[in-house]
Image (cartoon, rainbow, N blue to C red):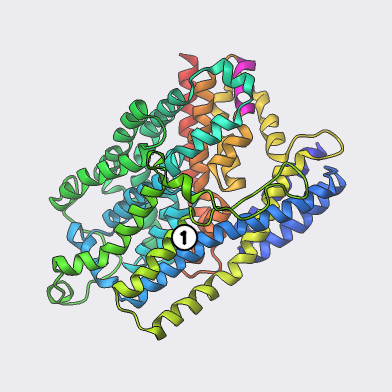
Amino acid sequence: MQYLLVAIFPFFLLLLLMIILKKPAYVAAPVTLVLTLITTYFIWEMDTLWFMVALIRGFFVTVEILFIVFGAVFLLTTMQKAHIFKPIHHILEGVSKDRRVQAILVAWFLVSFIEGAAGFGTPAMIAAPILVLIGFKPLVAVAISLVGESTAVTFGAMGVPITIGIADGLTSVQTQSLGNFIPQVAKTTALFHLAVGSFIPLAISVLVTYLVSKNLSKGFEIWKYAVFAGLAFTFPSFIIASVLGPEFPSILGALIGLSIVVPLTKRGFLLPSEVWRFDTPKDGENSTYLLTKSKLFKVVLPYILLLLLLVVSRVEVLGINTILQKYKIGPGSILGTSASHQLAPLYSPGFFLLLVSFYSFFHYKLRAKAIKNIVSTSVQKITLPFWSLFFILFLVNIMIFSSNNAIGLPSIPVFLAEEMRHVGSLWPLFAPFVGLTGTFITGSLTVSNLLFSAFQVETAFLYGFSPILILSLQAAGGAAGNTIAVHNVLAALTVVGLSRGEGEVIKQCAIPAFLYALCIGIIGLIVSLI
């Protein structure tokens, strides 16, 4: 019993401090870290060497994430200095003046596309600032961007959570027994997302109206349009996963969906006659601003360039990714252990964000004084979040490496998963929550899959379930967990200029994440009984 209490203690304390007591991460994280250090040393009897390993790896992972965050903040600040708010706003207003629709277009389609191209927390860091620029409050922008990111995560970063996360997370014996299982997992997971993920745009709409005006009914008013927008992404994504595998469902599904939805949205397809807004357009605003083709091109070119760079750098057939990943920094072995973390700065989305920002200096003809202000503002914005992220990631790595102890216990995440395993015939209902917990802890579905895939397959064999089904439930549930991953929330808040609010965002995102995993689990349980 004492080990179970030690295992759940960090999660309980972190959520208590951030959500109930509403303490910022830079307060909650170090308090939780110190107390976790004490309990894992004296009760879990974790080897002291691995505390140092966790600290060093936590630092390098923090640097890797903050490189992306800094790039996103830098680009946002550049766009603000270039005064492109009105053109971006005008572009979306040209599609629909309804704020619910605008939220879906950005937080669903754009986020899914960026997730498919880059992954690793990048989508919310790009989409949330765009939403802020067009008038959404920062907390609202972050929350809906994180919720919108859920479905596409399984096939994010060109399929890495499956092609590496699951494939490398199995033992050699398991891999041999399953044969060519990756295409089957991709297809089955995409089917779960088709059934449940199609309702995420509706969740975005409801979340927007609730957070802005505490009104749920206004969000449900566009349910037909929202579900259609959901299917416009998830159905093509399912077909692509079934035919091509896990690399392209998110990126191509988003492009296909957007090309279908935008023209129909302009015609008012499935939309109510009443437009919902949380702001009042200024008199004559639309009539006095003329968006010519040249102005449109000037506004969107940096973003088009960014998306092209992300996609080209990730497509393996071009070979550019191999070249960019050759240049690495960081320890190949931390303190002589098997642990490592090397950064490939030229392959990081942060590199491309900075590259596009530098190009934008010339594109928007910014003066030296403005550029100097952009640099100083960006550095100031990431200083405090550095410490919050570092403490969180130090804590995460302690839990990951806690298997190195004197009493033969598994790591804390695996220990918690094994405690859940005793539900037996109901395991398909709980398998998605293992994935959700893993992603919540680590902030990465890839890492979650690496941690739990072998365990999930052994559980499937033990109780007579299809390993493909259980692995797919893990992958789909883990995507939902990405919505509430603490360091993803921290990074997104930093980009929009907020130093606190993590607890509020997690509280708002937790319900969609839980319902997502629950619905997938129920479907999985029904399938297992057929």
Q: Is residue 73 above or below residue 237?
A: below
Task: List x then y, in percent, for residue 264.
Answer: 16, 47
The reply, left or right, for residue 279 in relation to residue 45 is left
Q: Is residue 188 magenta?
A: no
Taking depth in this image into account, of 22 and 460 the one nearest to the observer is 460
Image spot of residue 447 (x, y percent): 59, 41
- Residue 13 appears in the figure: no
Residue 102 placed where, x, y %? 28, 57
Look at the picture and state if 243 lies above or below 206: above
Where is residue 189 drawn, in percent x and y? Answer: 44, 30
Q: Residues within 10 Å of mark 1 (few under 14, many from 20)?
A: some
Left or right for 173, reference 508: right
Could you say which quadrant of the image residue 58 lies in? bottom right
- Does residue 212 appear to the left or right of 342 in the view shown? left
- 342 or 76: which is nearer to us? 342
Residue 462 lies in the magenta stretch: yes
Magenta highlight range: 454-463
Secondary element at image label 1: helix
Q: Is residue 388 visible?
A: yes
- Magenta portion: prevailing SS class: helix
Rendered residue at 26%/67% (across/down)? 299
Q: Amino acid at mark 1?
A: Phe
Q: Residue at horizontal 85%, vertical 44%?
A: 43
Residue at 50%, 59% in the rendered image:
68
User: Where 330 sits versus 316, above or below?
Assistant: below
* Location of the C terminus (image quadrant): top left
At x 48% / y 34%, what residue is drawn?
476
Q: Quadrant of residue 394?
A: bottom right
Q: Describe residue 183's horizontal placement relative to residue 328 as left or right.
A: left
For the N terminus, give its image quadrant: top right
User: What residue would you read off at disc 1?
Assistant: 351
